[in-house]
Amino acid sequence: MILAAAETRDIRLDELQRALARALPSASISTQGGPPLERSTATDPPQLARADVIEDAVLRAHDVTGPAEPPFSAFLDGTQRTDPVAHTADGAPIVSGVVAAVIREWTDGGARTWAHARQHRVYAPRAAMQAAEWEAVAALGLTAIDTSAGDPALADAHPAAHRDAAITQIQNDREQLELQLAQRWCGDRADALYVDGGLRGSVVLARAAQTVGVIKSHHTLFGDRAARRVIFGLAAGQRTSVFVVASPSKVPVASWYLRLRDCTGRDPLWGLVRVEVRHDPDAAPADVGAQADRMARRILAERTPTAHPDARWHTMVYGIRDCEVFLKATQ
């Protein structure tokens, strides 16, 4: 078993609240609990984006056929938990954030943890706090993260803006933890790594031959109206043509939509995932399509066993479900 180095200091929420009550008497302690902050905010706004097709003249459906491919060697997933533990007299939230990531490797003997990392930090907007308040938070025994750093406007902002800044920073910390594990895998192993999510946020992952990003949510849909009709009309076991996803600040990747399960009578996005892999600008269209078919066959083979009882089972493979069960058990 290989364990990643991580911050090992941890404090129970009730202990953290008692410490805050002693260190910061003016704070309002959140003794009644409540749902994690990530459940209280809206998701990213839906948007449409351009799809530059590189396999065909226009986006169309392809049946995924051919011989079986080797299964994925490992799966990467991460998790986060954000809890408001107190508020300053000005209403600024003090947030406990726990993030973790794991790579679970699968062999004939079953799954084992190849790498795991976890960190617990406290998040607060220093610009909106008195010096003594920040010093009290920084002395709690956890790493204190200033959620107002680099944004002078947060010195006098609505408490909800501070909450959102904390959530964004915690999400970034989770992504960085996942990235660290994935980079270690790419440096040590040549086997395929199934990543729950996209690859474009990392130059290393977007250019690695081992990584395959599988995206389950579709806040951004790629393609024009005609392309979307193709996407929504995919049958189980079909994929779209390959297209390039590019933006000025990120590494371009090759991508396609893949229908894992029959969506008859359901939402047109049910059972639909979008795949990201390394983009080779010099590859011939036929080679691009052949690579997509090979990877699509590997992903389709992961439909069994199903990820029940998770409500997202229709787009979640069992390897990712296994990662989530492990992470929940180690929270």
Image (cartoon, rainbow, N blue to C red):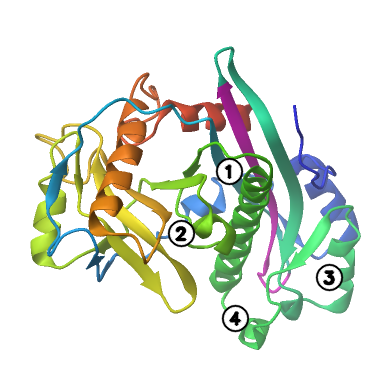
Task: Name which residue lies at 71% across and 72% down.
Answer: 125
* Three-letter amino acid code at the position of disc 1: Thr
Q: Find disc 2 in the rendering and name its residue.
A: 41
- Is 154 situated left or right of 208 in this image? right
Mark 4 to mark 2 CA distance (whole Å): 17 Å
Q: Do the residues labelled 4 and 1 touch (CB within 8 Å)?
A: no
User: Is residue 194 depicted above or below 69 in this figure?
Assistant: below
x, y percent for residue 142? 84, 53
Q: Quadrant of the C terminus?
A: top right
Q: Find disc 1 in the rendering and name its residue.
A: 79
Q: Which of marks 3 and 1 is nearer the N terminus?
A: 1
Q: Is residue 102 magenta?
A: yes
Q: Find disc 4 in the rendering and name its residue.
A: 157
Q: What element carries label 1?
A: strand
Q: Which of marks 2 and 3 is nearer the N terminus?
A: 2
- Which of the two residues, 216 or 125, is positioned nearer the viewer here? 216
Q: Give the range drawn in magenta.
A: 89-106
Q: How crowded is mark 3: few (under 14 residues within 10 Å), some or many (20 or more)?
A: some
* Three-letter amino acid code at the position of disc 2: Thr
Q: Which of marks 4 and 1 is nearer the N terminus?
A: 1
Q: Find disc 3 in the rendering and name its residue.
A: 134
The quadrant holding residue 63 is top left
User: Is residue 301 depicted above or below 102 in this figure?
Assistant: above
What main secondary structure does the magenta stretch of the protein show? strand
Q: Quadrant of the N terminus?
A: top right
Mark 1 to mark 2 CA distance (whole Å): 17 Å
What residue occupies the far bottom of the structure in this picture? 152
